[in-house]
Image (cartoon, rainbow, N blue to C red):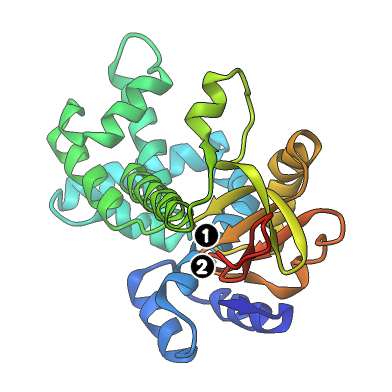
Amino acid sequence: MILTKAQYDEIAQCLVSVPPTRQSLRKLKQRFPSQSQATLLSIFSQEYQKHIKRTHAKHHTSEAIESYYQRYLNGVEENGAAPVLLELANEVEYAPSLMARIILERFLQEHEEAPPSKSVINSMLRDPSQIPDGVLANQVYQCIVNDCCYGPLVDCIKHAIGHEHEVLLRDLLLEKNLSFLDEDQLRARGYDKTPDFILQVPVAVEGHIIHWIESKASFGDECSHHAYLHDQFWSYWNRFGPGLVIYWYGFIQELDCNRERGILLHACFPTDIVTLCHSVA
């Protein structure tokens, strides 16, 4: 789904005043019925992550952490079965999984002899049964399963979706009888930063020569696309030549402005691939 900047801004503006819940996503789908659920979810997640980055610091002051921790203790003392942490996160407009991390770190600092390591914290968030307090373990679990933008559960889902689309792209390349090297093969040859697929024989797409293809199981907004350009795409271009980026959930139309410089954007696998023998694949 390719959106104009104006269409994207309209969707993003609707997200400013809604909480990051599945109920909000359903309302967004009702508001924009012509957009796919996957596209809206990707935009929803990206816009929320921007909000979290803007407000992250205020939630990590010593005063804020202590205030949250005391509110947590008071809440579970009153009713340990109530979703105290989840409600607190929603009240202060912070991601439930990130709130759970704050409280877990503070709890372990108080009850363990040594400060908890990042690996220990991550392990407990992935498996709350490791937390040495049953009430807190349940509170953390509630935050993890109700967070649709952050946390280990979301990370697993995103990883699986990304892998699924890479497999889809591989199958499409094989179906078109295109010879390629994948990321693992390229790294085995010593390349440290590579696209998902290098075409061993370049092809043409819409009159542009393509040497590599990158799969992104997300929506290409300005923030993410510019970051990818800086961190990945231009590096690929410098090393391998011009290439194609597939944003499977769509992108902002105006971002497809580097075609003449060697980077094309698509929202699906191209149907007009031309091989060196000038036949349509």
Label located before the other in sequence (2 or 1): 1
Quarter of the image with the C terminus in it: bottom right
Residue beneath disc 2 = 249
Residue at 39%, 46% in the rendered image: 163
Quarter of the image with the N terminus in it: bottom right
Residue at 86%, 55% in the rendered image: 261
Residue beneath disc 1 = 218
Residue at 70%, 80% in the rendered image: 4
Where residue 229 appears, as percent x and y from the top left, is 74, 48
Indicate which disc residue 78 carries: none
Reply above or below: 90 against 110. Answer: below
In this rendering, would 187 be left or right of 139? right
Where residue 144 appears, as percent x and y from the top left, is 29, 48
Residue furthest out toward the right: 260
Task: Report crowding for label 1: few under 14, some 14 to 19, many 20 or more residues within 10 A (C-alpha).
Answer: many
In the image shown, does 73 or 245 lie closer to the viewer? 245
Reply above or below: 104 against 188. Answer: below
Callout 2 secondary element? loop
Amino acid on which the number 2 mark rests in the picture? Tyr
In the image shown, does 121 or 163 lie closer to the viewer? 163
In this rendering, would 14 be left or right of 230? left
Amino acid on which the number 1 mark rests in the picture? Ser
Where residue 280 appears, as percent x and y from the top left, is 59, 68
In this rendering, would 246 be left or right of 238? left
